[in-house]
Image (cartoon, rainbow, N blue to C red):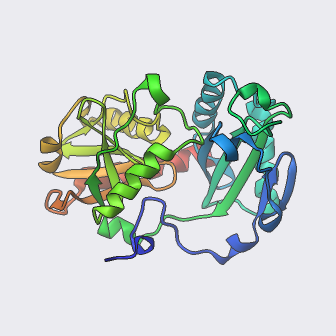
Amino acid sequence: MTDPGDRPSTHDASEDPRNRDIRIYVNGEIVHRDDAKVSVYDSGFMLGDGIWEGMRLHHGRWAFFDDHMDRFFEGCRAIELDPGMDRHDLLEALTRTAEANGMTTDVHCRLMLTRGVKSKPFQHPKLSRTGPTLVIILEHSRPAEALQAAGIRLATVPQVRGLPTSQDPKLNSHSKLNCIIACLQAEQAGADEALMLDPHGFVNTTNACNFFIVRRGAVWTSTGDYCMNGVTRAKVIDLCRDAGIPVLERNYALVETYGADEAFLTGSFGGLTPVAEIDGRAIGSGDRPIMTRLQSLYADLVQRETTA
């Protein structure tokens, strides 16, 4: 059996030795990664109580910064977590961290905010009394090129995307156990990542990225009711509309997915990533004209966004 560590994922990156000595932002201090620590009483570590963002830095500018900040602050408001900072303050912290690492492009950021250190190891949010914990991890990171040729293999899993009344999938929360279980189920099925259905049995998303198919020249994706509130997803939908490519946000079933001409994933790290097979079935002929066109349009959009 293949070692799960050898399987590709949408977050595979080219190895970069510079990441062994990165500096990390922890509550206003920037320290070597070996010295970057939070308390075992931190609510993020203890309970997954926090909100995070993943972003890309190109040419010294953050791609779609305002979109990411809109999502970040909306998530914080939803769980009544006060960052104690506005978006200008966060941009300043991001800039300090990038400068401390000498980073300007091909950089991935994981910005994490938790409710902070708890006075006792219990659930109630009022036990977090010291203020929030903010951590910023920046890494030199370029998506692995080999993945674009090979594509990702998905397996449909029993773990589903939850209802908004349980844990809303639109929240980028630190609690990712639902998706982790799905990923484990996919690996046990011999795939790279999980294709997750919604509570009604319609195709929704993967454990890590948003999911699209192409049928007869039209791009399909889920209604958005149960998927991650993806910034890249929204940009791809807009690009389709601007380019005159038919795009549908709709319910659709596995049978329509198996018969697709193309399938691909979207995410802030990898942009657009092709899907080679689902549940052991090859998707299409291997030609991906629509996805390839959208990749080019998306690359142009990122270039304009970060060099304007």
Residue 130, above or below 291? above
Q: Quadrant of the C terminus?
A: top right
Q: Could you tell me residue 123's position as x and y percent? A: 68, 32
Q: Residue at x 36, y 35 (%)?
A: 237
* The one of 57 and 118 positioned closer to us in this rendering: 118
User: In the drawing, does residue 264 fall left or right of residue 29?
Assistant: left
Based on the displayed image, in which of its 4 quarters is residue 178 positioned?
Answer: top left
Q: Is residue 292 above or below residue 201?
A: below
Asked if residue 176 lies left or right of residue 182, the reply is right
Residue for point 53% across, 72% down: 14
Residue 271 image offset from top left, x and y in percent: 45, 52
Is residue 183 visible in this depiction of the protein?
yes
Q: Quadrant of residue 15?
A: bottom right
Image quarter of residue 113: top right
The residue at 65%/22% (across/down) is: 77
Q: Is residue 216 visible?
A: no
Task: Please state if 91 lies on the left or on the right of 108 as rendered.
Answer: right
Residue 67, image x, y percentages: 57, 33
Judging depth in this view, the residue of 33 and 55 nearest the camera is 33
Q: Nearer the viewer, residue 62 or 270?
A: 270
70 with respect to 164 (left or right)? right
Q: How many tags in the picture?
A: 0
At 16% across and 51% down in the image, what residue appears?
Answer: 261
The N terminus - image quarter:
bottom left
The residue lying toward the viewer, choosing from 130 and 287, is: 130
